[in-house]
């Protein structure tokens, strides 16, 4: 069974940093690109970032470029999102998701990030 | 950047009805990389349809996707109580690389 289990939830002050984790199981981790997608409270889904199978290529939404870093540890089967210079508009539920055919076929349970003073 | 517009914003139907949800793109969607997701309150989204018309694993054949170019449709043939949720379409564009979601259609019980 494919599972993506997230951790790293937090309340962070503006300008602060936080790292999210997503532990994968039930599939060959190195066969898939991985993504982060976020959802502000009461709002729709917004893609944040993706990384290829071996971490050689990454890509970001303009809204987080230069502030967020996606990475993966294939030995630990874990995906990460390092977030810095956090702003109020980064407050959201963050999902990790497995990429397939340029869509997202499995999702983590979500991790709430609240940026507030 | 391609913008996806879903209609209607809210669809009120009864169990047993047929639901037709629309997703229109501001430019042609490359490779027909168009997916549909269902999201229930407090849950992560679930992939229903990928590559415009292929059902994801474990998805009922009551769900079907169609379309091409800029106009795409998700059809639910006979609504069950568990189908009432918010539905999102999503596309991939390679230049620049971006994955875009529509704003969602809420399917509610009439």
Image (tube, grey):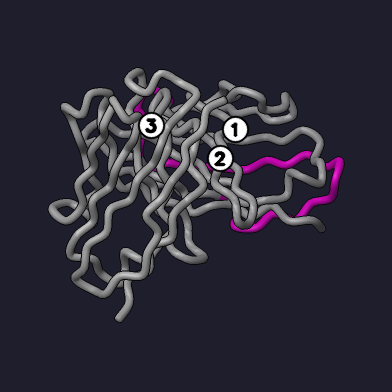
Residue identified by numbered label 2: B37
Residue at screen point 30% across, 70% down: A12
| Element class at badge 2 | strand
- Left or right of A76, for residue B71: right
Q: Considering depth in this image, is A92 or B15 the residue closer to the camera?
A: A92
| Element class at badge 1 | strand
| Element class at badge 3 | loop
Position of the C terminus of chain B by quadrant: bottom right
Labelled pair 1, 2 in contact (Cβ < 8 Å): yes
Residue identified by numbered label 3: B29
Query: Which mark is drawn over residue B48?
Result: 1
Position of the N terminus of chain B by quadrant: top left
Residue at screen point 81% across, 41% down: B80
The number of callouts visible is: 3
Residue at screen point 56% across, 29% down: B49
Query: Which mark is drawn over residue B94?
Result: none
Confirm whether the magenta stretch covers residue B100.
no
Q: Which badge, 1 or 3, comes first in the chain's sequence?
A: 3
């Amino acid at each position: 069974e494919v599972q993506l289990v997230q951790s790293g939830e937090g309340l962070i002050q503006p300008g602060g940093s936080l790292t999210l984790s997503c532990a994968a199981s039930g599939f060959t981790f190195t066969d898939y690109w991985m993504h982060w997608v976020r959802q502000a409270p009461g709002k729709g889904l917004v893609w944040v970032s993706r990384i290829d199978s071996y971490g050689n290529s990454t890509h970001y939404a303009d809204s987080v470029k230069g502030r967020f870093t996606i990475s993966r540890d294939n030995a630990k089967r874990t995906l990460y999102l390092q977030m810095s210079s956090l702003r109020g508009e980064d407050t959201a539920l963050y999902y990790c998701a497995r990429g397939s055919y340029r869509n997202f076929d499995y999702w983590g349970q979500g991790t709430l990030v609240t940026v507030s003073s | 950047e391609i913008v996806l517009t879903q209609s209607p914003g809210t669809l009120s139907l009864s169990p047993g009805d047929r639901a037709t949800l629309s997703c229109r793109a501001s430019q042609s969607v490359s490779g027909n990389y168009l997916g549909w997701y269902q999201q229930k309150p407090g849950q992560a989204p679930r992939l229903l349809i990928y590559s415009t018309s292929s059902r994801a694993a474990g998805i009922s054949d009551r769900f079907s996707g169609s379309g091409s170019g800029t106009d795409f449709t998700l059809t639910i043939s006979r609504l069950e109580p568990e189908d009432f949720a918010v539905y999102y379409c999503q596309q991939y564009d390679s230049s620049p690389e971006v994955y875009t979601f529509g704003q969602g259609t809420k399917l509610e019980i009439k």
